[in-house]
Image (cartoon, rainbow, N blue to C red):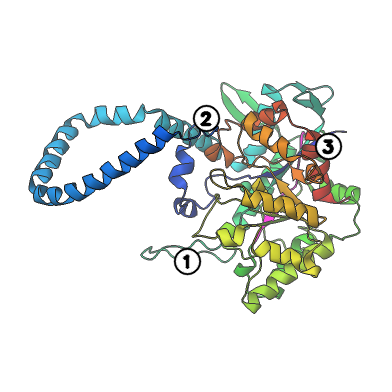
């Protein structure tokens, strides 16, 4: 049996991601208006180029010195001009708007928003079924063998790891009237996710007259669930700062991970999950012991939202330290957001960077065996590669450090550059990189049109070690050896 792994995706609908946090992103406009990728070859500036630049700057300087007094003197006339222009525009506002809307960058931004919203507006309980439906109907699917072709490889299963994000602290700005957030901000998100998994295993979608609806419940669904295309292993999002003390946090961890043991074999772990998959409903307050065991496969941390990997405050440090030791003792994999974008509350790059606090964490003997995935391969704006290079160094030093390529470019160029990193100076790297998509958030910030599109770009890319990235490495990261 062949399994394809997507180690990093999200299952959200419009009620889950914190839109107020998203609005506070400093790079919101940039990411939204990022147009389709162009060639990134940098041309050298010639002598005449430099001369032109210098003359330009001089002219701007002179302009500013002369213009400012002129502007002050002429301000009544300017105001009158603005008034007349506004009156004219008022009449032609419609044509101005049409012009703005026809600009390529605006068109691209609108189509991104449309494809994101149309997916986010699908009720969460349908989303896995919808992904399944479109993969089977738009890619090559062999119904008799129950295999899907990704590129030239036939897979029996696709593993999805939806990561829950703890949006706990939202930095609500002053002046906002409803300024409290609930204590357990992720209960609804988790409940909806569990219900979506349950729906996926018990139903199919049927399409009639362009409308999708659920089939009758599959009789004996528990026996036939092994025939479904997806296996779903969610990661629990948390921020220790949202819990009073270690006891409070440990209670939560035990609720989900008490049965994990470092000595589990990969098969034992996977079998336990498979047995549980699809059996839970959305009720997050079931008091029966063991009810929530073996549902979550790992933990998601989000430094850009304020999680501090190495707090200086001793009370906070105690919680984080115990969390790491708990994860090591039970071999719970952790994925930490690692890019200078994403959901950002203020400037938390110093918490997110693999160079600073995370490096310090791993330098502590007691934490060096953490199973840790730096998401997005440390992606930074422009051509910066410090974080990426730091991650590569960490994968050389520590045995269980991984990195995923989710939400990176959807171009052949990205994969070409990635391939160049698998060289003699990084002989370990091809065993450390994990395939991830960041679907459905990637619809908004990359050129991916759909989940199919993201998979196809990966499948078509010329890249060595592909099967390591989408099969062997994620399997090892998720379940251990
Ligand atoms: Zn993500």
Say left or right for 287 vs 120: right
Q: Position of residue 17 (x, y in %)?
A: 54, 50
In the picture, the quarter occupied by the N terminus is top right
Instruction: Name the one closer to the observer, 159 or 420.
Output: 420
Q: Is residue 245 above or below residue 90?
A: below
User: Disc 3, disc 1: CB below 8 Å?
Assistant: no
Q: Is mark 1 within 8 Å of ligand 1?
A: no
> Is residue 14 visible in the rendered structure shown here?
yes
Q: Position of residue 108 (x, y in %)?
A: 45, 31
Give residue 425's position: percent from left, percent from top.
Answer: 78, 45
Image x and y of residue 285, in percent: 68, 61
Residue 182 vertical position relative to residue 248 in the rendered view, above or below? above
- Residue matched to label 3: 226
Camera-side mark, 3 or 2:
2
Is residue 235 rendered magenta in the image?
yes
> How would you rate the neighbour count of disc 3 (Cα within 10 Å): few for under 14, some for 14-19, many for 20 or more?
some
Q: Residue at x 75, y 39 (%)?
A: 201
Residue extending furthest toward the bottom:
314
Residue positioned 44% across, 65% down in the render: 179
Q: Which residue is mark 1?
A: 180
Q: Compute the Cα span from label 2 to label 1.
A: 44 Å
Residue drawn where x is 69% and y is 69% of the image: 320
Residue 41 covered by magenta stretch: no
Q: Nearer the viewer, mark 2 or mark 1?
A: 2
User: What residue is shown with label 2?
Assistant: 38
Q: Residue 49's mark?
A: none
* Mark in the foreground, 3 or 1: 1
Q: Secondary structure at mark 3?
A: helix
Count the numbered circles shown: 3
Magenta-highlighted residues: 228-238
- Please tell me which of labels 3 and 2 falls first in the chain: 2
Q: Is residue 30 left or right of residue 3?
A: left
């Amino acid at each position: 049996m062949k399994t394809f792994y997507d180690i990093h995706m999200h299952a959200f609908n419009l009620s889950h991601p914190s839109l107020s946090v998203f609005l506070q992103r400093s790079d919101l406009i940039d990411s939204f208006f990022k147009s389709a990728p162009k060639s990134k070859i940098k041309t050298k500036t010639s002598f005449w180029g430099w001369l032109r630049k210098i003359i330009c700057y001089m002219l701007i300087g002179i302009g500013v010195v002369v213009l400012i007094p002129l502007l002050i003197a002429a301000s009544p006339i300017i105001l009158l001009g603005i008034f007349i222009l506004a009156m004219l525009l008022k009449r032609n506002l419609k044509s101005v708007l049409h012009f703005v809307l026809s600009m390529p960058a605006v068109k691209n931004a609108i189509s991104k928003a449309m494809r994101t919203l149309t997916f986010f507006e699908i009720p969460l309980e349908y989303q896995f079924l919808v992904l399944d439906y479109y993969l089977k109907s738009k890619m090559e699917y062999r119904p008799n063998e129950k295999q899907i072709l990704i590129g030239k490889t036939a897979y029996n299963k696709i593993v999805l790891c939806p990561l829950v994000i703890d949006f706990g602290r939202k930095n609500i700005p002053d002046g906002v009237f409803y300024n409290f957030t609930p204590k357990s901000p992720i209960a609804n998100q988790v409940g909806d996710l569990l219900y979506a998994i349950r729906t996926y295993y018990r139903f199919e979608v049927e399409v009639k007259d362009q409308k999708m609806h659920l089939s009758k419940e599959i009789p004996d669904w528990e026996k036939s669930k092994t025939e479904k295309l997806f296996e779903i292993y969610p990661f629990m999002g948390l921020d220790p700062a949202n819990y009073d003390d270690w006891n409070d946090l440990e209670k939560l961890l035990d609720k989900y991970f008490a049965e994990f043991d470092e000595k589990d074999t990969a098969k034992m772990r996977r079998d336990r999950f498979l047995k549980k998959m699809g059996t839970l409903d959305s009720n997050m307050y079931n008091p029966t012991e063991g009810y929530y065991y073996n549902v979550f496969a790992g933990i998601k941390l989000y430094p850009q939202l304020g999680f501090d990997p190495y707090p200086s405050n001793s009370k906070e440090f105690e919680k984080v330290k115990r969390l790491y030791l708990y994860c090591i003792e039970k071999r719970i994999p952790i994925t930490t957001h690692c890019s200078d974008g994403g959901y950002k509350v203020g400037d938390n790059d110093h918490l997110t960077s693999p160079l600073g606090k995370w490096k310090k964490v791993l330098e502590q003997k007691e934490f060096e065996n953490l199973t840790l995935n730096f998401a997005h391969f440390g992606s930074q704006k422009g051509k910066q590669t410090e974080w990426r290079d730091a991650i590569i160094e960490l994968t050389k030093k520590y045995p269980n450090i991984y990195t995923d390529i989710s939400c990176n470019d959807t171009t052949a160029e990205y994969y070409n550059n990635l391939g160049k990193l698998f060289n003699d100076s990084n002989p370990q790297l091809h065993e450390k990189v994990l395939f991830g998509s960041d679907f459905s958030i990637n619809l908004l910030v990359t050129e991916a049109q759909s989940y199919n599109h993201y998979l196809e770009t990966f499948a078509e890319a010329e890249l060595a070690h592909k099967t390591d990235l989408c099969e062997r490495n994620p399997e090892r990261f998720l379940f251990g050896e």
